[in-house]
Amino acid sequence: MTRSELLAAAQKKLGRKIRPHQLNYAVSRGYVKPESRRPDGWNVYGDEAVKGLIAFMRERSRSIQSASV
């Protein structure tokens, strides 16, 4: 799946909006890894990437909630 399909699938499972910069951050932190790279240079993501992005967003929301207490 492409980057936009990854965001759409994760948003549907999580039930809230995920912004593209949040995906970039999750990739840079190693939560999301592409399965392969297409010949045109775009990354291809799989189900593990969706799970990783959801895990990142849940951890991020927990850390924000604990910081606000």
Image (tube, rainbow, N blue to C red):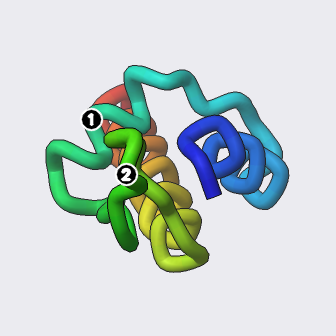
Q: In this view, does 53 lie to the left or right of 11?
A: left
Count of numbered circles in the view: 2
Tell me where residue 41 appears, x and y as whole percent: 33, 41
Above or below for 13 versus 11:
below
Q: How far apart are marks 1 and 2 (CA)?
A: 24 Å
Residue 7's tag is none
Quarter of the image for residue 60 reads top left
Which residue corresponds to the image point at 35% horizontal and 68% vertical from the top-left?
36
Quarter of the image for residue 17 reads top right
Q: How crowded is mark 2: few (under 14 residues within 10 Å), some or many (20 or more)?
A: few
In-front residue for pair 6/67: 6
Tell me where residue 1 appears, x and y as whole percent: 63, 58
Say what secondary structure mark 1 lies in. helix
Extreme-left residue of the structure:
29
Which residue corresponds to the image point at 75% horizontal and 43% vertical from the top-left?
8
Q: Mark 1 points at which residue?
A: 25
User: Which dot, 1 or 2, sits closer to the camera?
Assistant: 2
Q: Mark 2 points at which residue?
A: 39
Say what secondary structure mark 2 lies in. loop
